[in-house]
Amino acid sequence: MAHILVVDDDDIVAEHAAQVLMNAGLACGWVSDAKSAMDVLKKREPDLILLDQNMPGENGTTLLRRLRNSTRFFDIPVIMLTGVQGVREEHIAYYNGAQDYIRKPFSDKMLIYRVRQALRSREGRARKSVRARMTDFEDMPVMVPRPMRSI
């Protein structure tokens, strides 16, 4: 079962999106700001994040950039779920690494479909790429080979 994290400062929208996804058989929880989202991520990594753009404190674009620059969270699929209507903002979201962009108000069926599409596109891929696996070896000492002596 996929685990979805909804990050939205509008409690009504976040709760509705979470309920729609739970009714579709997905595990879902929600938080109302970027700081709470990072606290959750440190404890449990979701399979997908639905992320609002406009939130108090750190906005969705900044959080998305932090996730993409993180060696731990860079490959979590993120769908922007936002009331921002501009095409420019949509392009910025894709540029920063969003998998999809859903405008509010959204239809329940469309939300389920696009979340499942994002999850399906991740199936079969390793959870972490070579970049993440390499960080596991950062603390290991570097072995420098000795030059061969000539005979």
Image: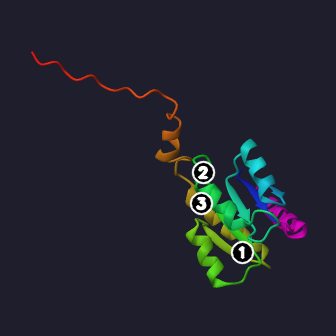
* Numbered tag placed on residue 2 in the rendering: none
Query: What is the CA distance from the residue labelled 2 to the residue labelled 3?
Result: 23 Å
Number of other residues with Cα within 10 Å of mark 2, as a class: few under 14, some 14 to 19, many 20 or more: few
**Between 104 and 151, which is closer to the camera in this rendering?**
151
Q: Report which quarter residue 147 is drawn in.
A: top left
Tell me the magenta residue range.
9-28
139 left or right, relative to 119: left
Verify CB contact (< 8 Å) between mark 3 and mark 1: no
Instruction: Give the number of callouts.
Output: 3
Do we see residue 122 in this rendering? yes
Amino acid type for the residue under numbered disc 3: Arg
Q: Report which quarter residue 115 is drawn in.
A: bottom right
Do we see residue 25 in this rendering? no
Query: What is the CA distance from the residue labelled 3 to the residue labelled 1?
Result: 15 Å
**x then y, percent, for residue 116:** 66, 63
**Residue 100 on the magenta span:** no
**x then y, percent, for residue 137:** 49, 33
- Per the image, the residue denoted by label 2 is 70
Work out which residue is located at the far top of the displayed protein and give it. 151
**Between 146 and 5, which is closer to the camera in this rendering?**
146
* Numbered tag placed on residue 110 in the rendering: 1
Query: What is the CA distance from the residue labelled 1 to the residue labelled 2?
Result: 30 Å
Q: Nearer the viewer, mark 1 or mark 2?
A: 2
